[in-house]
Image (cartoon, rainbow, N blue to C red):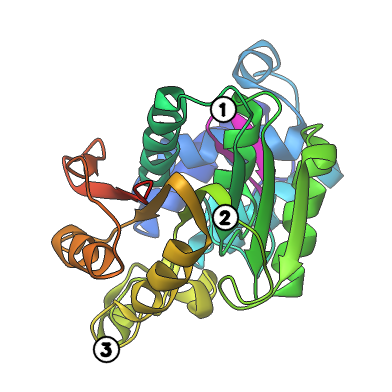
Amino acid sequence: MSDPFTGQTVESARRTLSARLRTAGIDEAELDARTLLGAALGLDLTGLVAQASRSLTVTEAATVAEYAARRMAGEPVARILGVREFWGLPFQLSHATLVPRPDTETVVELALEIIRERSSSTPPRIVDIGVGSGAILLALLHEVPGAFGIGIDLNLDALRTAKRNAAALGLAQRAAFVACSYLDALTGSFDLIVSNPPYIRTAEIADLSREVREHDPHLALDGGSDGFNAYRALIPQAAARLSPGGALIVEAGEGQADGIATLMQAAALTVERPPKADLAGIPRAVSARKMPP
C-alpha cells in the first residue's frame, strides 16, 4: 500500500500533512507541517511556494510519511529533525539532551547583562552545569569574544553532542567539556556559573506534555520531591568556585525564584537584583554575586 503522500504535489502534501496533524490534536499543525515538509524536501518557505505544483518523488513522499507518523505519535519536531534553534544558532540534539526552549534564553540575556557590568577587561571564565546540547554556554561564548567556557554533564552522550555543537559553531577552541557531578571535578575559580538544572517535582513529571514526558531525558527534568534537589547541591558548590565579584545564574521553574534566592543567600551569595522574567512574565532567571572580601 502506498503512503498518503505518493503522487501528491508539494502544496497538496502540505495540506494533507497539516490536516493529519490537526486530526491528531497537534497544536501548531500548520507550522509543523511546513517545517517537516520543508525539511523532507530540503526547501525553505520560499522554496515550498516556488515548487508548490511539482510532484513529490517517491523518496520524498516516504520521508514525509515517516515524519508525519512520528509527529502524530507525539514526537516533537525538533526531535524528528535532530536540531533546534536557540539564540539564533542551530543546535544538534540527542536523546540525552533537552530540547532548548525560548524560556531558557532569559538566562543568556541576564548573563550578558551581568558580563557587561563587569569592571574587568579580562574575558570571563564561564561554567555551565548540566550543559546538555551546549545551548546556554555556546550562546554566551558566541556573544562574548575571548570568553572561555567549561560545560559539565553526567551524561557522556550529552557531552559529545555539546562538543559537536561547539565545533559546528566555530567555538571548539574556547570550550571544554567535563563529565562529573556538578562541580566535583573542577578546581580554580570562575567569573560566571550558569545552569538550567532539573527542577520539575517528581510527582508532576507524569502531567507534563507528551512531547516532554516521553522524549526529554528524565535526568534533566526530575528535581526531586520539591523540585529543589539540584539547587541545594549546586548552589553551595558554585559559591565556593566563584571568583570575588563572580555571579551565579540559574533557571527557575514557576514559583521557585524566592526559594532559590533563599538558598543563594544561605550560601553567602548576595542577591542584588530581582529575577529576570521570561516572555510570559514568569521569574525565570535568578542570580546572585559573590561579594569581594
Mark 2 surroundings: few (<14), some (14-19) or many (≥20) residues within 10 A: many
Residue 151 vs 83, above or below: the answer is below
Inspect the image, locate mark 1, and give the three-letter code of the amino acid beneath it. Gly
Verify CB contact (< 8 Å) between mark 1 and mark 3.
no
Rendering coords of residue 219 (x, y %)? 52, 79
Return the disc, 3 or 2, that comes first in the chain's sequence.
Answer: 2
Q: Is residue 6 magenta?
A: no
At x 64% / y 69%, what residue is drawn? Answer: 153
Rendering coords of residue 150 (x, y %)? 68, 53
Which region is colored magenta? Answer: 83-93
Q: Could you tell me which quadrant the N terminus lies in?
A: bottom right
86 with respect to 228 (left or right)? right
Q: How many marks?
A: 3
Q: Give the spatial CA distance, label 3 vs label 2.
A: 24 Å
For label 1, the residue is: 88
Return the disc, 1 or 3, that comes first in the chain's sequence.
Answer: 1
Of tags 3 and 2, the one toward the viewer is 2
For label 3, the residue is: 225
At x 24% / y 64%, what residue is drawn? Answer: 260
